């Protein structure tokens, strides 16, 4: 016999489970939560008896678990246990046996369990839930109902389409039989008002509240991606990074609302969603206050217990275990995960750099310098964030601040990639990569213009800031002319760790745009298609490249003077025929292949994935003949690295220039 036994009581669970297994000789799997039960159900191949608490907590019931179990194993039997009075739940119980926990004895449990196994399934089980009030296809104002998603005590939630704009929504209908109760109607309306006041990109917004033919309802966003409930059902697990982003996203939303005094019901698996980019969001669970007080630390712990079954082996499980070990509120878990995310970012930076160093598209095999970098990258986890060596730049850091000078690139033909001739109209491109000082001006402008919008239309809703990781420390070091990551910084140092959305927004704020690949390459190679900005002869000293890069930071920079990024105002030979600087090295740069309505190209390894292209070498990439023609495909537009920045272009001359 295969038994699934859900008992949330730690003081009795082990004894009861042991008795079922030992005395009845049954194969018993014992779980403490609905999440664990769903995970087990998705993976098991057989189930004979489900023993579950009828009411698990304020938001979760064994009735949902019963339905999920019988959907997979129709011949299974069910036994409910309960510490509560179940009067009013007769329809949900649907005739299955119930064992009252007063607490119940082990002997009574075994008797009831054996009886449940020997009895026939109740015919009422098929009517465990009343039929939906709104049938599929029903029109309620501008909304067409598709299916019922959930049934709550006072409402029903449907998947629907807002017909006028063909937008999928969740439609929450107050149960019509309750409309005569004035206090419940007022509570429903108060809940609408509170939900409408909550505005956060990780919280599904309320779209509209309305009344049609006397029925009260409101509509809200259907969060992107899949719910934890669906992930449990699929029997999937999540990686360390996915678990981190999931918990961080939920905590960010909850911290925002709790700090503003919003009350809420407990989160459950149907409320939490994660999309294809590992961004988490939640259903709007916020409501007016009541007499119940919620303990944020206990709720964080409940989230950890909910997520724990999804953690894959190794780092993911270790992460959840470490987070559970300490009592934290929502702010505390955010601070803890900030450190985790920073560590993960530092661990992955050189792996990303290594990916960029794949030979140009269409070329098989990897050059010898790729393997050198790959070996060096093994040391980065231990050294990148805590460099101990000193850097000796070839020039002293200047106190002056470089302005963003634009250089004209004349119209006409040029050599693109491998001897391909193309033609471009005239354009202007920034002489230097965008610096920390210039980017700081952008961030300051955003603070002064909170309602201004420079975001790309497709920017994820969950991205709410253009501030790069560790910006406070980076900017402080640049202003002081001190070191960061062991490298001397200045306000003329290129800004890095910006994703594609950041670069796009900055360019739009400047009244400019990102360069296309063709524009970038012409500016770098001239119209003759040079191998290097300075000509066709290689030189390991002319650009800030990785021939002298040291992952530990103790010996780097002996050729060009810089182990990491170099300031844009230094003396350098990395200058193109048009006077554009740092195209071969320093930091690689985002481009905008989507210019003029052309989509991003397909990733060569993942044809269904369209991503921006990165061009140019950087401080950790060894010199080679493909620096100006290699096309590096980002993992996504959200990707950031210490070795990537950007520059901008304009279709018109700067003010005062012709």
Image (tube, rainbow, N blue to C red):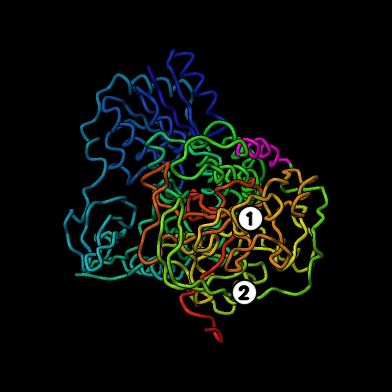
Front in this rendered view, residue 196 or 495: 495
User: Residue 629: within the magenta?
Assistant: no
- Write down the residue under mark 1: 585
| Residues rendered magenta in the picture | 370-382
Front in this rendered view, residue 625 or 377: 625
User: Residue 372: within the magenta?
Assistant: yes
Foreground: disc 2 or disc 1: 1
Q: Is there any visible trace of residue 329 in the rendered image?
A: no
Mark 1 residue crowding within 10 angstroms, few (<14) / some (14–19) / many (20+): many
Question: Residue 260 location in percent, x, y?
Answer: 56, 67
Question: Residue 187 location in percent, x, y?
Answer: 38, 66
- Look at the numbered disc 2 and give the secondary structure of its residue: loop
- Look at the numbered disc 1 and give the secondary structure of its residue: loop
Mark 2 residue crowding within 10 angstroms, few (<14) / some (14–19) / many (20+): some
Question: Residue 90 location in percent, x, y?
Answer: 29, 42
Which residue: 45% across, 31% down? Answer: 6
Q: On the rendered structure, is 131 left or right of 274?
A: left
Find residue 26 and report its image quarter: top left
Front in this rendered view, residue 200 or 115: 200
């Amino acid at each position: 016999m295969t038994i699934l036994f859900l008992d949330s009581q730690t003081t009795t669970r082990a004894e009861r489970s042991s008795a079922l297994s030992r005395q009845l000789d049954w194969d018993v799997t014992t779980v403490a939560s609905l999440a664990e039960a769903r995970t087990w159900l998705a993976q098991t191949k057989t189930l004979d008896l489900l023993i579950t608490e009828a009411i698990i907590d304020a938001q979760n019931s064994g009735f949902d678990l019963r339905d999920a179990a019988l959907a997979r194993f129709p011949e299974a039997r069910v036994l409910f246990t309960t510490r509560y009075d179940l009067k009013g739940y007769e329809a949900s119980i649907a005739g299955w046996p119930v064992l009252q926990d007063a607490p119940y004895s082990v002997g009574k449990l075994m008797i009831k369990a054996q009886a449940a196994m020997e009895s026939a399934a109740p015919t009422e089980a098929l009517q465990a839930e009343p039929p939906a009030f709104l049938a599929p296809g029903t029109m309620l104002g501008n909304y067409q109902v598709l299916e019922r998603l959930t049934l709550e005590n006072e409402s029903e939630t449907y998947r629907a389409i807002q017909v006028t704009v063909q937008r999928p929504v969740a439609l929450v209908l107050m149960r019509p039989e309750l409309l005569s109760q004035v206090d419940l109607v007022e509570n429903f309306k108060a809940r609408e008002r509170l939900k409408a006041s909550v505005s956060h990109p990780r919280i599904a917004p309320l779209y509209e509240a309305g009344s049609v033919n006397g029925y009260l309802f409101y509509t809200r966003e259907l969060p992107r991606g899949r719910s934890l409930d669906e992930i449990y059902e699929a029997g999937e697990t999540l990686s360390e990074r996915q678990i981190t982003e999931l918990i961080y996203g939920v905590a960010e939303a909850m911290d925002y609302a709790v700090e503003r005094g919003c009350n809420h019901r407990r989160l459950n698996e149907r409320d939490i969603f994660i999309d294809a980019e590992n961004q988490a969001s939640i259903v709007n669970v916020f409501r007016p206050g009541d007499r119940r007080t919620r303990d944020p630390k206990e709720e964080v712990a409940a989230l950890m217990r909910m997520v724990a079954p999804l953690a894959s082996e190794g780092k993911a499980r270790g992460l959840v275990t470490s987070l559970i070990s300490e009592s934290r509120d929502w702010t505390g878990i955010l601070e803890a995960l900030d450190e985790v995310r920073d560590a993960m970012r530092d661990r992955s930076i050189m792996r990303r750099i290594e990916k960029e160093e794949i030979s140009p598209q269409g070329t098989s095999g990897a050059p010898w310098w790729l393997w050198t970098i790959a070996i060096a990258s093994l040391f980065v986890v231990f050294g990148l964030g805590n460099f101990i060596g000193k850097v000796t730049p070839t020039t002293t850091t200047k106190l002056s601040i470089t302005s963003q000078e634009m250089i004209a690139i004349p119209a006409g033909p040029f050599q693109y990639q491998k001897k391909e001739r193309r033609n471009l109209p005239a354009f202007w491109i920034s002489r230097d990569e965008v610096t920390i000082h210039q980017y700081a001006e952008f961030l300051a402008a955003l603070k002064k213009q909170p309602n201004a919008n420079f975001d790309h239309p497709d920017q994820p809703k969950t991205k709410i800031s253009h501030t790069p990781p560790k910006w406070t420390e980076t900017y402080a070091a640049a202003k002081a002319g001190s070191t960061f990551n062991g490298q001397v910084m200045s306000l003329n140092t290129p800004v890095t760790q910006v994703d594609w959305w950041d670069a796009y927004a900055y360019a739009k704020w400047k009244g400019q745009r990102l360069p296309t690949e063709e524009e970038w390459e012409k500016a770098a190679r001239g119209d003759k298609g040079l191998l290097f900005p300075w000509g066709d002869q290689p030189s390991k000293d002319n650009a800030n490249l990785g021939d002298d890069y040291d992952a530990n930071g103790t010996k780097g920079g002996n050729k060009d003077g810089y182990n990491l990024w170099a300031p844009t105002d230094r003396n350098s030979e990395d200058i193109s025929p048009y006077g554009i600087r740092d195209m071969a090295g320093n930091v690689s740069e985002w481009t905008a292949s989507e210019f003029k309505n052309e989509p991003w190209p397909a990733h060569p390894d993942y044809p269904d994935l369209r991503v921006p292209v990165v061009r140019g070498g950087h401080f950790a990439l060894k010199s080679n003949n493909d620096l100006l023609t290699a096309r590096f495909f980002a993992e996504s537009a959200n990707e950031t690295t210490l070795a990537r920045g950007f520059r901008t272009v304009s279709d018109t001359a700067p003010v005062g220039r012709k």
